[in-house]
Image: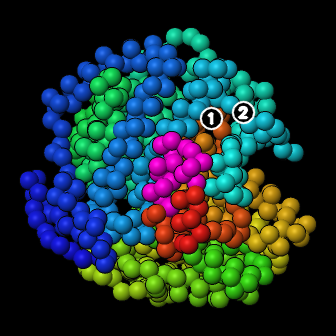
Amino acid sequence: MRVYGTGIQPNGRSYIVIYPRDSEESFVSLSEIPFTPDASTTQELEQKIQRLQDGAQAFVSMSVLERIQLLDQALKGVKDVAERWVKLACAAKGLAYGEPESAEEWLGGPMTTMRNLRMLREALLDISLSGRPRVLKGSLSTRPDGRVVARVFPRDIYDRTLYGGFTADVWMQDDVTQSSAVDTMAELYQGGTAEPQLTLVLGAGNVASIGPMDVMHEMFVIGSVCLLKLNPVNAYVGPVLEEAFAAWIESGVMEICYGGADVGEFLCQHSCIDRIHITGSDRTHDAIVWGPAKDQAERKRLGDRYNEKPITSELGNVSPVVIIPGQWSAADLAFQAENLATMIVNNGSFNCNAAKLLVMHAEWPQKAEFLDHLRQVLAKIPSRLAYYPGAHQRYEALVSGRHDIETLGTPQSEDHLPWTLILNVDSDNPQEPIFSTEPFCSVLSETSLSAPDTASFLRAASAFCNDRVWGTLNVCLVVHPKTLKEPDTASAFDDAIAELQYGTVSVNHWPAVGYGLTVTPWGAYPGHSLEDIQSGRGIVHNTCMFARPQKTVIRGPFRVFPKPPWFVTHKRAHKVAEHLTSFEYRPSPLKLPAIIFNALFG
């Protein structure tokens, strides 16, 4: 990557203009420089709220076909701005557009957004025909423990072609039966008169698709018009989103606004806001619900909420990756090292689902060898711009005073952070901050559990993740298929999946797959109180519109060929991602060869 020039925006923020490596064809033009719009004024906010109030009544009266038209308009809108969206994000995060590293901005931006729109469109088409989203034939089953499971992925020949070997199941809460799971789908569309609602969506600053996708869930699953306040960190994408969702804004069902904590506070307290949804930190959530930090403990004790509005949230996680011991080949070790490195590196590790805690069997003979493979992969990956505010301070707080620390690679500038391993963290220390502090920066910690055999390790790891590790958003289990041929291990593995209290449990692959599929609910494991919110309450995406999901279980092959395009080591990931984005806009068998060709040579 080469810096072409620097400058100052009208709002005082600096910017850089970047060429991709070894090419000038994808120059980031002046119109594509990240520019943060000014904070919305009180007058502008009031006008937006009034337009949404006017649109809310019309929205609840819209037919299903009229809502499908909104989705069609947004699909075209996102398609039209996709390239600019990605260029802006790459420039803001110091990534080279047109290089493999830019794939994550295609996949985590317009591609996933369009998939979410498309899955909602399919659901509404099903509702228009039969009253409910389609349930795949033979997909419902009941486990021995009584929990109902619905297979939601793959849904068609395209899913099986593009994501061969991957499956996703939605597990329902304990009191759900097969019949009630179906009967309560898409409750918004089951008759009756919906009340007009206005939801304030507080967008996340790390991944720009989160805000609009949260809006989609509120609109088409909950039935509320939305005011999306973008986080100042990625508010540069706001004008692009305003263009993409112009039809929604013109229809009075969505508005976008800008500003910091003061704007958020004003909107959270506004009498016309009926509901709040936030993707962010538990600290921000508690400030909304319980008020200033100095008063929160007493307010929680008394149950005296600072803000009484209904609130849902997705608030992060100390995301564990549990390695189940087995006999792995050199190719196995290499593949899974790249897999884990991807979970660390993507988006500079500023993800709520980034791998943050590696849990291994203390006596696994290949433990050291696997860590060596991971070191080799991370050492070859250039450091990333630590663009998220407070990253350097969080990093220093985590590594300060520790001895078993390894940094891999050399930061390219003082604005970068190295990939960092914190090794041999004591799993028996209940006060260890590594287990309770989400490291929103480029750090992976490692801890080990002793156990007499693999089945015992699985039981210990499940209990450790549930009881010691903060958050319930997502967990990854990595297990070789030969290991599961041992009956005791297979039984313990099934028990672990059932017992893990996480919203997404992913086998062999990054749980972010569950974020991207969108047919799977995304959010914390249900049951957190407002006083101890951890990873949040409620879900998003859920385009199947299940009323009472408990968790998503994703399973993928131990090794995949071709290499998944989200792997940071994929040499043509940006090509695959761009073609996948086009595919999600309008699926066609004619688009598959380009995707497959580039995937094969990654």
Residue 34 against residue 124 in the figure, above or below: below
Q: As drawn, which residue projects farthest toward the front?
A: 590
Q: Earlier in the sequence, mark 2 or mark 1?
A: 2
Name the residue rendered at 41%, 18% in the picture: 59
In this view, the residue in front, 496 or 235, is 235
Q: Position of residue 289 (x, y in %)?
A: 39, 39
Q: Residue at x 84, y 44 (%)?
A: 143
Quarter of the rendering occupied by the C terminus? bottom right
Check the picture and name the quadrant holding the N terminus.
Answer: bottom left
Q: Which residues are magenta?
A: 576-592
Residue position for label 2: 135
**Would you call the spot at circle 2 few (<14 residues within 10 Å), some (14-19), or many (20 or more)?**
some
Q: Is residue 405 left or right of residue 24?
A: right
Magenta-span inclusion, residue 286 = no
Return the residue nearer the eye: 204 or 341.
341
Q: In the rendered image, which residue does mark 1 sit on?
A: 544
Q: Amino acid type of disc 2?
A: Val
CB within 8 Å, label 2 to label 1 = yes
Q: Residue at x 32, y 76 (%)?
A: 21
In percent of width and height, residue 407 lies at 43, 85
Q: Secondary structure at mark 1?
A: loop
Q: Does residue 133 appear in this view?
A: yes
